[in-house]
Image (cartoon, coloured by chain):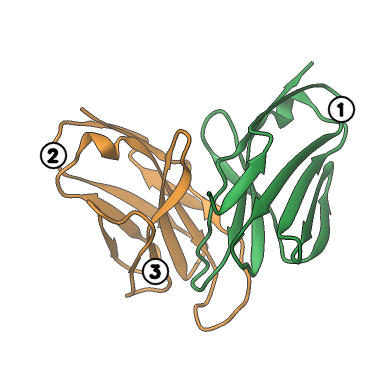
């Protein structure tokens, strides 16, 4: 299994450009997450998808949109990139089933480094 | 005040030393994760625990739910243990995690 994969690994954008970060997992997990990591801020949840067909806002959703295309894939879109969105973006997944209280480990992708000029 | 506080923020030790990283949190939680982030950026989940203690090789994690405190211990530390260790309590539904800022550990040979 490849686990959680993310593309691209690196990206440089100009202010106002748009792009989509791709994430896929091959573990048949129900839940997927997008985080950003900034120095001194730790990891912060942008959006999550508890199951196929559902998405919810996390802590810092402004400026982003997401799509849970199918059970495997969860994409993050920046419609009009801003320098404040320069960060490292991590996708994660877990087996969690929202209707239960079963506790599950999250598996992280390798990250995407984004620089917005 | 941050919901999750880790200490120390930076720790440098010599190979072989016993390492302790602490995590205090203010949110009510159902479980707590310890994550390891290597210099290359990859994040690995080390432990998920909701009570007591877990051990995996040279790593030991403990949690006291009443005191809202968890510790990560590394015995016989090695330079390859050098990484950022992140505490992430989970509160609320949908498996959402709250992350500490991390402890940067450097083990010198």
**Whole-percent x and y of residue B30?**
64, 70
The mark nearer the N terminus, 3 or 2, is 2
Residue B76 visible from this viewpoint: yes
User: In what element is the residue under mark 3?
Assistant: loop
Residue A1 visible from this viewpoint: no
**Whole-percent x and y of residue A110?**
48, 41
Residue linked to disc 2: A17
Residue linked to disc 3: A71
Whether residue B6 sits left or right of residue B53 in the image: it is left
Q: Residue furthest bottom?
A: A99
**Whole-percent x and y of residue A90?**
43, 46
Residue linked to disc 1: B17
Cα gap from disc 2 to disc 1, whole angstroms: 49 Å
Question: Are callouts 2 and 1 both on one chain?
Answer: no
User: In what element is the residue under mark 1?
Assistant: loop
Chain letter for the green part:
B
**Whole-percent x and y of residue B74?**
81, 38
Residue B55: mark in rendering = none
Q: In which chain is the residue bearing label 1?
A: B
Cα gap from disc 3 to disc 2, whole angstroms: 28 Å
Query: Which residue is pictured at 72% across the width and 66% down the height?
Result: B50
Cα gap from disc 3 to disc 1, whole angstroms: 44 Å
Chain letter for the orange part:
A
Q: In which chain is the residue bearing label 3?
A: A
Q: How many marks?
A: 3
């Amino acid at each position: 299994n490849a686990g959680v994969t993310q593309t691209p690994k690196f990206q440089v954008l100009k202010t106002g450009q748009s792009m989509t970060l791709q994430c896929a997992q091959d573990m048949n997990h129900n839940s997927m997450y997008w985080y950003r990591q900034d120095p001194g801020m730790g990891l912060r949840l942008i959006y999550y998808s508890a199951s196929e067909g559902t998405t919810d806002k996390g802590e810092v959703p402004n400026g982003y949109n997401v799509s849970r295309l199918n059970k495997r894939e969860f994409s993050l879109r920046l419609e009009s990139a801003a320098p404040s969105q320069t960060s490292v973006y991590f996708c994660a997944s877990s087996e969690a089933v929202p209707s239960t209280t079963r506790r599950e480990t999250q598996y992280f992708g390798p990250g995407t480094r984004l620089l917005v000029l | 005040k941050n919901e999750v506080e880790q200490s120390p923020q930076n720790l440098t030790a010599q190979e072989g030393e016993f390492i302790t990283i602490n995590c205090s949190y203010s949110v009510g939680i159902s479980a707590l994760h310890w994550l390891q982030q290597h210099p290359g950026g990859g994040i690995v989940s080390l432990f998920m625990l909701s009570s007591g203690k877990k051990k995996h090789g040279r790593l030991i994690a403990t949690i006291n739910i009443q005191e809202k405190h968890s510790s990560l211990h590394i015995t016989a530390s090695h330079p390859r243990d050098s990484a950022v260790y992140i505490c992430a309590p989970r509160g609320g539904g949908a498996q959402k995690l709250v992350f500490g800022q991390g402890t940067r550990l450097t083990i010198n040979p």
